[in-house]
Image (spheres, coloured by chain):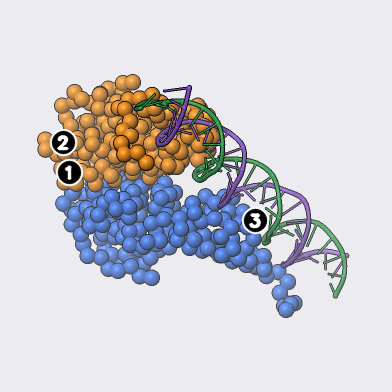
Chain colours: A orange, B blue, C green, D purple
Amino acid sequence: MTNNAPSPPPDGRVARRQRRNRDALIEAARDIMMEKGVDSATMLEIAARADVGAGTVYNYFKSKDELAIAVLETLMHQLGLRIEAVTKTFDDHAQVYAYGIRTVLDTAIQDVRWAQMLHRSEVIADAMFRMMGPFAIRDLRLASQAGRFQVSHADLVWRLTTHALIGASLAITTGQVPASSADQIIAQLLCMTGIGPEAALELAGRSRPPLGV
Amino acid sequence: MTNNAPSPPPDGRVARRQRRNRDALIEAARDIMMEKGVDSATMLEIAARADVGAGTVYNYFKSKDELAIAVLETLMHQLGLRIEAVTKTFDDHAQVYAYGIRTVLDTAIQDVRWAQMLHRSEVIADAMFRMMGPFAIRDLRLASQAGRFQVSHADLVWRLTTHALIGASLAITTGQVPASSADQIIAQLLCMTGIGPEAALELAGRSRPPLGV
DNA sequence: TTTCATAGTTGACGATCATTCATTTTTGGC
DNA sequence: GCCAAAAATGAATGATCGTCAACTATGAAA
């Protein structure tokens, strides 16, 4: 047993390869899981697409579930950043919040690949809560300070909204609710911010600039 | 052993056995799934507890998922009936609705056995939507007619509420949200009915008669 | 009562897949 | 080059869902 602590160099070949492997695994898992669903995606296929051995996956993720969570976190984080880029210049923080949740709904119901992930509602809702939460909760608070919203428990409102939003997306993609209800869905969710029903509908119906890449 | 007289009994031995088997399967599945979780419950163990062969399960349910759905439907249906029995005499339909969703939340977070089922959020939310929906949507409409609520899309409000409610229950059982937030959660969900935030909090905080057996 | 077609039941088996682990390969300091 | 530690590998493991060919119970008809 050697005394010197083997501190690895800040950026060695190993670190680079590990970043590459991890990224490749998340990307491969995302593609396959979104194409055929989380359950039907096999670890072997994911490993093959990421060009690593089957056992290597477990050096990076403790289980298939943890890999799926990492995929969903990445998705939600990226979507959050894209929303942030568009809404950065909005004056009305209430509108920023509304744009955010509307964009999630639209993305979920328009992109066929999202539909597969919706069947893990609680996981995707939790990833959404954590990854987009900093933005959303900030907007809820700022809009409240500006007198647009009246939210006393922003984190709770955001928690409930994520679950309801994913549930609504699922209901639309499974045909239980028509896609034309989107405005009404957003309006109902905005009601949890303390804005009135009429103001909520108006906010939900505003025209929206397109999402960037 | 032969009762020769009745040639065509309206319900033969087969029908009786099938009812028995189906009920026993749902009961066995409920017990085992609630104890160790849907995923960890094996079809073999369920079949054994119901005292039928392993293959027999598939005469009644196309898959494990369908069996889990049947379990959840039964649970939700029974809970709906128990709520109905208590609220039958309430004058205020808004209060009936509030009592219903509060009771679901309380049941979910108090009964340890429910916690396991919450990890299939979209399935339990859907079962709740369908089994308790007739009551809940009726109450939303009646309360609106009485001027207590202002709901124009009762089914949508109920759909969003089920998902949010299950999400909230999960957040509490996993310790992400304190159980003391229950009042606030119910109040937020009541906001979707068009009642104001203050009235929602008041309604959520009212004392409730206990649920019967 | 006996016979028989049908419907229901059975449990061993096939197929699939997440995860493990003994072995091999790579790495980076000496 | 050499070596110990870290990382990667992929064949093997174990568990489980769902299938199926054989078996049994049922009840109507002979």
Q: Chain of mark 1?
A: A
Residue B55: mark:
3
Q: Please tell me if label 3 and label 2 are on a single chain.
A: no
Locate residue A12 relative to residue B69 in the image: left or right.
left
Separation of marks 3 and 1 at Cα, in angstroms: 54 Å
Asked which secondary structure carries label 3, the reply is helix
| Residue indicated by mark 2 | A143
* Residue in view at x 49 percent, y 61 percent: B32
Chain to which the residue tagged by mark 2 belongs? A
Check if mark 1 and mark 2 are on a common chain.
yes
Which label number is shown at residue A75? none
Q: Quadrant of residue A124?
A: top left
Near mark 1 (Cα within 10 A), the count class, few <14, some 14-19 or many ≥20, is many
Q: Position of residue B7 (x, y in %)?
A: 73, 71
- Foreground mark, 3 or 2? 3
Q: Are marks 3 and 1 in contact (CB under 8 Å)?
A: no
Which amino acid type is marked by label 2?
Ala
Instruction: Tell me the amino acid under the disc marked 3.
Output: Gly
Q: Position of residue B207 (x, y in %)?
A: 22, 65
**Could you tell me which residue is drawn at 63 percent across and 66 percent down?**
B17
Tell us which disc is closer to us: 3 or 1: 3
Query: Which amino acid, mark 1?
Result: Val
Marks 1 and 2, how far apart at CA:
9 Å
In-front residue for pair C14/D14: D14
Measured along the vertical axis of the image, is residue B138 above or below residue D7? below
Instruction: Choose between B14 and B40: the one closer to the eye.
Output: B40
In the depicted structure, whether residue C1 falls above or below residue A4? below
Q: Position of residue A126 (x, y in %)?
A: 33, 42
Relative side of A94 to B52, left or right: left
Q: Which mark is residue A151?
A: 1
In this rendering, does residue A62 appear at all? yes
